[in-house]
Image (cartoon, rainbow, N blue to C red):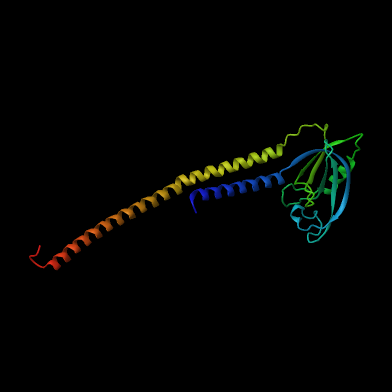
Amino acid sequence: MRLPAWKTVKRVLLALVILVVIAVLHYNLPQHDIVRITDTYEKRIDPGRNAFFWATPDAGSDPNATNRDVFFIQAVRPNGRVIVYRNEDTGWGWPPYFKFDTANLQAEAADLKSAADNPKWVVITHYGWRNQFFSIYPNAISIRPASGPGERIIPWASIIILGMLAFILLMIRRMWLQFRERMVDPALESVGEMVDRIDTKADLAAARARGLRGRLRAWFARLRNGPGRQ
């Protein structure tokens, strides 16, 4: 493979890795929506091919059950667009929100329902995505009253988590650079010196071989010519 083509492959692979990391972070990090809750309900679901996007059964439920009842929260954004959240425990699993209060959260959501003529705006903290085609719903983590539809929310949790991840990556990079400076580079230099010595010895051996061949040719030439012949 030519070098430019290999560089292109490396760039494509790096871009794919970066996209995957961004997608994982965007799905799992907490997000905040200002909405008006319109209804709450419970529905029996049977996770199929999209089971990855559903949480584990609620704490105390049978983890081997093929279907279960799940709470849902219907809401409307300030721009009029609707959004539906699921309300499931995360337990001790991933992502590590350690949510065990599904029933309490559903009661809070039901108590905060409001109509369009007298809205009660709330902030719903959640993780995940909403996709109608694959029946994927974000999972509500907490609910609190909002000061209004234009309340400014600073995602401190996401900022702290991303800052910690950036710090860890910088530390790993620094450790790698130190390891490379102390171990890898000297080892590569030793290998390079060894290769140079081998090349030098090979060149000397080749020179000796050429000298030996030259002496042998001269000796055979004298034998063919016979003694005293020029």
As rendered, which of 89 and 77 lies closer to the eye? 77
Residue 101 seen from this side: no
Question: Whole-percent x and y of residue 227?
Answer: 9, 67
Question: Whole-percent x and y of residue 106?
Answer: 86, 46
As rendered, which of 3 and 193 lies closer to the eye? 3
Q: Is residue 146 above or below residue 204?
A: above
As rendered, which of 206 and 168 lies closer to the eye? 206
Residue 5 seen from this side: yes
Question: Where on the picture, by quarter, is residue 50?
Answer: bottom right
Q: Is residue 13 above or below residue 211?
A: above
Question: Where on the picture, by quarter, is residue 122?
Answer: top right
Question: Where on the picture, by quarter, is residue 199?
Answer: bottom left
Q: How many marks?
A: 0
Question: Whole-percent x and y of residue 178?
Answer: 49, 44
Asked if residue 215 lies left or right of residue 152, the reply is left
Farthest residue toward the left? 228
Asked if residue 217 lies left or right of residue 174, the reply is left
The residue at the point 68 percent across, 45 percent down is 25
Quadrant of the snapshot with the C terminus = bottom left
The residue at the point 45 percent across, 49 percent down is 184
